[in-house]
Amino acid sequence: MGAMESKYSTEDINKIMATWWKTIEKKTQKPTMTIPNMHFTVPTLWGRKKSDPPAPEWPTVFSTIWRSPYTPNSFVPHFNDCVGRAAARTQEYLQFVDPEDKFIPSPTSLNEIFLMTYISQSSRLQMTNSFNCTPMTSQQRILLGADWVWAVLDRPTKNPCIQIAVQILHLPERCGERASGVSPEVCTESMQMAKMESGNRNEAERMVDFCMSIGTDCYALFLLFGRKGDPGNIYGVLSNNFGAAVGKTKINRALIENFFRGSRYLHTPTGMLQAIITKRAGDPLTLLIKFT
């Protein structure tokens, strides 16, 4: 078969090729989306619809993946972890039995073990910006009756929106009376004034008065390090309605223990905190909790 001859001359072919390249260069390129901080572009489908690509300030896929948004109740699992560790460690000492029956951990030591364990773990989990713990000084403990105060903090202002005043109660056979942890030698003038200010009210009544002065968003939590018939476990009674008993009956350990008579359900620390957070404002709430 012989060679085919083109009907165009070499000069005509060069002109046709030049015209074709100019036509390609004038064609509109398909729009692309540029991902910030990346050095490549990705073709998109909206070019076929002749739509504008997203504005650069729109969130990218990467920012969505790496972002960890704050949720109001994100501290609840951390609280459960901190309280669980503190209760478990305290229980070890609470259940300690000296073979020679000469040594018993003091109430003050048990209180400090619980509080130190909780604070250490909460700091490790960095939850203090949303849920903090404020230990009371000796003067505050005498005046307010609380060992420490837990508080749910408002995110922008860091002001407390919910507070839980905590008082630890020990079995009478362990300490006789609740130890103040303060020796007469270091009892300062301010502490003596605090005792005078407290009047004839016991520590439980002082803490209830303190919570009532703040409102229904402040709860009194009595932590029982052991109960009659169960000295090795930690229980709690929480309420924002102890004020209903003021003037009608004495608020003391006997009253707190009486809450457990006939009780069938005990909340977990997580359940306690969830119930407080989700409660409708102004409603009364009373819960029984088991911490170990």
Image (tube, rainbow, N blue to C red):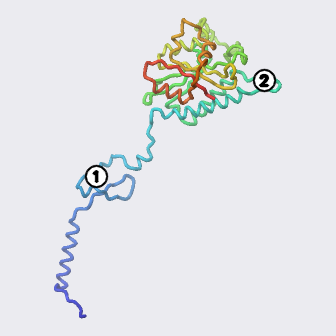
Which mark is nearer the camera, 2 or 1?
A: 2
Res. 237 image quadrant: top right
Residue 221 spot, x, y in % from top left: 57, 20
Query: Looking at this view, is 235 or 188 the one in front?
Result: 235
Q: Is the N terminus in the top left, top right, bottom left or bottom right quadrant?
A: bottom left
Residue 143 spot, x, y in % from top left: 58, 13
142 shown above or below 270: above
Q: Which residue is located at x 51 percent, y 29 percent?
A: 131
Q: Is the C terminus in the top left, top right, bottom left or bottom right quadrant?
A: top right
Residue 271 spot, x, y in % from top left: 53, 29
Q: Name the residue carrying label 2.
A: 103
Q: Say whether marks 2 and 1 touch (CB < 8 Å).
A: no
Left or right for 237, reference 158: right
Left or right for 3, reference 264: left
**Dot 1 lies on which element?**
loop
Res. 288 image quadrant: top right
**Dot 2 lies on which element?**
loop
Res. 234 image quadrant: top right
Left or right for 16, reference 176: left
Classify mark 2: residues with Cα within 10 Å, few (<14), some (14-19) or many (20+).
few
Residue 38 numbered tag = none
Q: Which residue is located at x 81 percent, y 27 percent?
A: 99
Residue 44 spot, x, y in % from top left: 31, 57
Q: Which residue is located at x 20 percent, y 80 percent?
A: 14
Residue kind at label 2, given as amino acid type: Phe
Classify mark 1: residues with Cα within 10 Å, few (<14), some (14-19) or many (20+).
some
Residue kind at label 1, given as amino acid type: Pro
Q: Name the residue carrying label 1.
A: 53
Furthest toward the right, the residue is 100
